[in-house]
Amino acid sequence: MKRSKQFLFVFAIIAFTSAFISCKNNKKKDINKDKLPEELAVKTVNPTVLFENEYAKVSKVSLASGESQPTHDGLTRVIYALTDYSIDWEEQGKKLGTKAWKKGDVHFHEAGTHAAKNSGTTLAEWLVFTKKSTDLPECGENTVENDVTSVSPDFSEALFENEDFKITQVNLPVGKSIPMHSGINRIIYSLNDYNLKYESDKADKLDKEFNSGDIHWHEACKHALENIGDTEAKFLVVSYR
Protein backbone atom coordinates (compact mmCIF):
# COMPACT_ATOMS: atom_id res chain seq x y z
CA MET A 1 0.00 0.00 0.00
CA LYS A 2 2.83 2.36 0.88
CA ARG A 3 4.61 1.66 -2.44
CA SER A 4 1.37 2.25 -4.31
CA LYS A 5 1.01 5.71 -2.73
CA GLN A 6 4.62 6.56 -3.56
CA PHE A 7 4.08 5.51 -7.18
CA LEU A 8 0.95 7.66 -7.45
CA PHE A 9 2.81 10.64 -5.96
CA VAL A 10 5.71 10.34 -8.45
CA PHE A 11 3.28 9.87 -11.34
CA ALA A 12 1.41 13.03 -10.30
CA ILE A 13 4.65 15.08 -10.25
CA ILE A 14 5.63 13.84 -13.74
CA ALA A 15 2.16 14.57 -15.11
CA PHE A 16 2.18 18.10 -13.62
CA THR A 17 5.66 18.85 -15.01
CA SER A 18 4.67 17.65 -18.49
CA ALA A 19 1.52 19.76 -18.41
CA PHE A 20 3.51 22.85 -17.31
CA ILE A 21 6.11 22.46 -20.10
CA SER A 22 3.38 21.88 -22.68
CA CYS A 23 1.55 25.00 -21.53
CA LYS A 24 4.77 27.06 -21.69
CA ASN A 25 5.53 25.87 -25.23
CA ASN A 26 2.00 26.66 -26.33
CA LYS A 27 2.39 30.18 -24.96
CA LYS A 28 5.59 30.62 -27.01
CA LYS A 29 3.74 29.43 -30.11
CA ASP A 30 0.88 31.83 -29.40
CA ILE A 31 3.36 34.73 -29.04
CA ASN A 32 4.99 33.83 -32.36
CA LYS A 33 1.55 33.57 -34.00
CA ASP A 34 0.90 37.17 -32.96
CA LYS A 35 4.07 38.31 -34.75
CA LEU A 36 3.96 39.14 -38.43
CA PRO A 37 6.10 36.93 -40.72
CA GLU A 38 8.08 40.09 -41.58
CA GLU A 39 9.04 40.59 -37.92
CA LEU A 40 10.26 37.02 -37.58
CA ALA A 41 12.35 37.14 -40.76
CA VAL A 42 14.20 40.42 -40.24
CA LYS A 43 17.91 40.02 -39.52
CA THR A 44 20.20 42.97 -38.86
CA VAL A 45 23.64 43.08 -40.45
CA ASN A 46 26.53 45.40 -39.61
CA PRO A 47 28.96 46.76 -42.24
CA THR A 48 32.37 45.13 -42.74
CA VAL A 49 35.30 47.55 -42.52
CA LEU A 50 37.67 46.89 -45.43
CA PHE A 51 40.13 49.74 -44.93
CA GLU A 52 40.70 52.57 -42.46
CA ASN A 53 43.25 55.25 -41.69
CA GLU A 54 43.05 58.59 -39.90
CA TYR A 55 41.45 60.29 -42.90
CA ALA A 56 39.17 57.73 -44.51
CA LYS A 57 37.27 54.50 -44.01
CA VAL A 58 35.90 52.02 -46.54
CA SER A 59 33.10 49.66 -45.51
CA LYS A 60 31.10 47.04 -47.37
CA VAL A 61 27.42 46.36 -46.72
CA SER A 62 25.83 43.08 -47.88
CA LEU A 63 22.11 42.57 -47.21
CA ALA A 64 20.20 39.50 -48.35
CA SER A 65 16.53 39.96 -49.17
CA GLY A 66 14.68 40.99 -45.98
CA GLU A 67 17.85 41.79 -44.02
CA SER A 68 18.43 45.25 -42.59
CA GLN A 69 21.08 47.58 -41.21
CA PRO A 70 20.44 48.74 -37.64
CA THR A 71 20.01 52.46 -37.07
CA HIS A 72 23.46 54.04 -36.76
CA ASP A 73 25.38 57.28 -37.24
CA GLY A 74 27.23 57.96 -40.46
CA LEU A 75 29.82 60.61 -41.36
CA THR A 76 30.04 62.41 -44.71
CA ARG A 77 30.28 59.65 -47.32
CA VAL A 78 29.75 58.44 -50.87
CA ILE A 79 28.10 55.15 -51.80
CA TYR A 80 29.11 52.92 -54.73
CA ALA A 81 26.60 50.21 -55.69
CA LEU A 82 28.15 46.77 -56.25
CA THR A 83 24.82 45.19 -57.33
CA ASP A 84 21.37 46.23 -58.56
CA TYR A 85 19.13 46.59 -55.50
CA SER A 86 16.25 48.37 -53.79
CA ILE A 87 16.12 49.33 -50.11
CA ASP A 88 13.69 50.92 -47.69
CA TRP A 89 15.57 53.98 -46.44
CA GLU A 90 15.29 55.76 -43.09
CA GLU A 91 17.17 58.95 -42.26
CA GLN A 92 17.13 61.02 -39.06
CA GLY A 93 14.20 58.91 -37.84
CA LYS A 94 12.10 59.55 -40.96
CA LYS A 95 11.06 56.81 -43.37
CA LEU A 96 11.87 58.09 -46.86
CA GLY A 97 10.46 55.25 -48.94
CA THR A 98 12.12 52.83 -51.33
CA LYS A 99 15.36 53.73 -53.13
CA ALA A 100 16.54 51.74 -56.16
CA TRP A 101 20.15 51.62 -57.40
CA LYS A 102 21.98 50.01 -60.29
CA LYS A 103 25.47 48.47 -60.17
CA GLY A 104 28.01 51.28 -60.56
CA ASP A 105 25.68 54.04 -59.32
CA VAL A 106 27.24 56.61 -56.98
CA HIS A 107 25.46 58.90 -54.54
CA PHE A 108 26.35 61.13 -51.59
CA HIS A 109 25.14 61.43 -48.00
CA GLU A 110 25.73 64.13 -45.43
CA ALA A 111 26.51 63.01 -41.87
CA GLY A 112 23.50 61.72 -39.93
CA THR A 113 21.61 58.80 -38.41
CA HIS A 114 20.18 56.28 -40.86
CA ALA A 115 19.00 52.70 -41.42
CA ALA A 116 18.27 50.51 -44.44
CA LYS A 117 16.33 47.34 -45.21
CA ASN A 118 16.65 45.23 -48.35
CA SER A 119 13.10 45.36 -49.73
CA GLY A 120 14.00 43.59 -52.97
CA THR A 121 14.54 39.97 -53.94
CA THR A 122 18.26 40.19 -54.79
CA LEU A 123 21.43 40.76 -52.77
CA ALA A 124 21.94 44.44 -51.92
CA GLU A 125 25.64 45.20 -51.76
CA TRP A 126 27.46 48.53 -51.69
CA LEU A 127 30.68 50.26 -50.67
CA VAL A 128 30.77 53.20 -48.26
CA PHE A 129 33.66 55.65 -48.65
CA THR A 130 33.67 57.76 -45.48
CA LYS A 131 35.47 61.04 -44.89
CA LYS A 132 36.71 60.97 -41.29
CA SER A 133 38.52 64.31 -41.25
CA THR A 134 38.66 67.56 -43.17
CA ASP A 135 42.28 68.00 -42.04
CA LEU A 136 43.84 66.14 -44.98
CA PRO A 137 47.53 66.13 -45.98
CA GLU A 138 48.63 69.08 -48.11
CA CYS A 139 48.40 68.55 -51.86
CA GLY A 140 50.87 71.24 -52.96
CA GLU A 141 50.50 71.95 -56.67
CA ASN A 142 48.44 68.79 -57.26
CA THR A 143 44.79 69.53 -58.02
CA VAL A 144 41.76 67.44 -58.90
CA GLU A 145 41.36 69.55 -62.05
CA ASN A 146 44.61 68.04 -63.37
CA ASP A 147 43.78 64.44 -62.49
CA VAL A 148 43.47 61.39 -64.76
CA THR A 149 40.34 62.70 -66.53
CA SER A 150 42.31 65.70 -67.82
CA VAL A 151 45.03 63.62 -69.53
CA SER A 152 43.21 60.39 -70.45
CA PRO A 153 39.50 61.08 -71.04
CA ASP A 154 39.24 57.97 -73.25
CA PHE A 155 40.26 55.70 -70.36
CA SER A 156 38.50 57.47 -67.48
CA GLU A 157 35.05 58.69 -66.49
CA ALA A 158 34.03 60.96 -63.62
CA LEU A 159 31.09 59.23 -61.91
CA PHE A 160 30.46 61.84 -59.22
CA GLU A 161 31.90 65.09 -57.94
CA ASN A 162 31.13 67.60 -55.18
CA GLU A 163 33.11 69.68 -52.69
CA ASP A 164 34.04 66.60 -50.62
CA PHE A 165 34.72 63.86 -53.17
CA LYS A 166 35.42 63.06 -56.78
CA ILE A 167 34.79 59.48 -57.93
CA THR A 168 36.42 58.39 -61.19
CA GLN A 169 36.39 55.01 -62.89
CA VAL A 170 39.47 54.07 -64.92
CA ASN A 171 39.36 51.36 -67.61
CA LEU A 172 42.90 50.98 -68.95
CA PRO A 173 43.26 48.48 -71.84
CA VAL A 174 46.17 46.05 -72.10
CA GLY A 175 49.36 47.78 -73.26
CA LYS A 176 47.95 51.30 -72.87
CA SER A 177 49.43 54.07 -70.68
CA ILE A 178 48.25 57.12 -68.76
CA PRO A 179 50.81 59.97 -68.80
CA MET A 180 52.03 61.87 -65.75
CA HIS A 181 49.17 63.68 -63.99
CA SER A 182 48.10 64.99 -60.60
CA GLY A 183 46.43 62.97 -57.91
CA ILE A 184 45.21 64.41 -54.63
CA ASN A 185 44.63 62.37 -51.45
CA ARG A 186 42.79 59.31 -52.70
CA ILE A 187 41.70 55.71 -52.29
CA ILE A 188 42.08 53.20 -55.12
CA TYR A 189 39.56 50.34 -55.25
CA SER A 190 40.31 47.52 -57.71
CA LEU A 191 37.30 46.30 -59.70
CA ASN A 192 39.18 43.33 -61.21
CA ASP A 193 42.59 41.63 -61.27
CA TYR A 194 45.32 43.51 -63.18
CA ASN A 195 49.02 44.42 -63.39
CA LEU A 196 50.44 47.93 -63.72
CA LYS A 197 53.77 49.66 -64.05
CA TYR A 198 53.56 52.66 -61.70
CA GLU A 199 55.85 55.66 -61.34
CA SER A 200 55.51 58.90 -59.39
CA ASP A 201 57.46 61.94 -58.28
CA LYS A 202 57.81 60.18 -54.91
CA ALA A 203 58.95 56.73 -56.06
CA ASP A 204 60.81 54.91 -58.84
CA LYS A 205 59.04 52.73 -61.40
CA LEU A 206 57.39 49.72 -59.83
CA ASP A 207 55.53 46.70 -61.22
CA LYS A 208 52.39 46.18 -59.15
CA GLU A 209 49.80 43.40 -59.09
CA PHE A 210 46.26 44.03 -57.86
CA ASN A 211 43.31 41.74 -57.19
CA SER A 212 39.61 42.52 -57.31
CA GLY A 213 38.58 44.23 -54.06
CA ASP A 214 42.08 45.47 -53.19
CA ILE A 215 42.17 48.90 -51.55
CA HIS A 216 45.08 51.27 -51.04
CA TRP A 217 45.64 54.91 -50.13
CA HIS A 218 47.78 57.53 -51.85
CA GLU A 219 48.66 60.99 -50.66
CA ALA A 220 48.95 63.73 -53.29
CA CYS A 221 51.54 63.15 -56.01
CA LYS A 222 52.19 63.23 -59.73
CA HIS A 223 52.14 59.77 -61.25
CA ALA A 224 51.83 57.72 -64.45
CA LEU A 225 50.54 54.22 -65.24
CA GLU A 226 50.98 51.50 -67.84
CA ASN A 227 48.93 48.31 -68.11
CA ILE A 228 51.56 45.56 -68.37
CA GLY A 229 49.18 42.66 -67.74
CA ASP A 230 46.92 40.59 -69.96
CA THR A 231 43.60 41.97 -68.68
CA GLU A 232 42.02 45.41 -68.79
CA ALA A 233 42.72 47.33 -65.56
CA LYS A 234 39.50 48.57 -63.97
CA PHE A 235 39.57 50.59 -60.77
CA LEU A 236 37.93 53.44 -58.87
CA VAL A 237 39.80 56.59 -57.87
CA VAL A 238 38.04 58.11 -54.85
CA SER A 239 39.56 61.55 -54.34
CA TYR A 240 39.15 63.23 -50.93
CA ARG A 241 38.94 67.01 -51.21
Image (cartoon, rainbow, N blue to C red):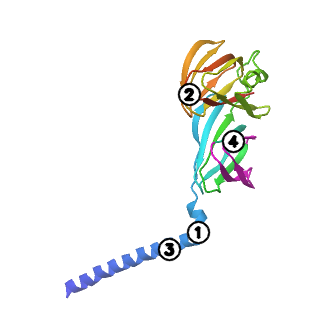
Mark closest to the chain's N terminus, 4 or 1: 1
Give the residue at mark 1.
Answer: 35
Residue 59 pos. (x, y %) = 61, 38
Within the image, what quadrant is residue 137 found in? top right
Q: Nearer the viewer, mark 3 or mark 1?
A: 1
Give the residue at mark 2.
Answer: 194
* C-alpha distance separating marks 4 and 1: 31 Å
Give the residue at mark 3.
Answer: 27
User: Helix, strand, or loop for circle 1?
Assistant: loop
For the residue pair 39 and 239, the one nearer the viewer reads as: 239
Q: Is residue 68 above or below residue 8?
A: above
Q: Is residue 90 above or below residue 238?
A: below
Q: Nearer the viewer, mark 2 or mark 3?
A: 2
Residue 109 pos. (x, y %) = 74, 41
Q: Residue 74 got which mark?
A: 4
In the picture provided, is 140 more to the left or to the right than 234?
right
Q: Is residue 12 above or below residue 135?
A: below
Q: Main secondary structure of the magenta part?
A: strand
Q: Which residues are magenta?
A: 82-111
What residue is rendered at 64% in x and 12% in y? 202
Question: Dots 3 and 4: beta carbons under 8 Å?
Answer: no
Q: Amino acid at mark 4?
A: Gly
Q: Amino acid at mark 3?
A: Lys
Within the image, what quadrant is residue 187 found in? top right
Mark closest to the chain's N terminus, 4 or 2: 4
Q: Amino acid at mark 1?
A: Lys
Residue 170 pos. (x, y %) = 67, 29
* C-alpha distance separating marks 1 and 2: 50 Å
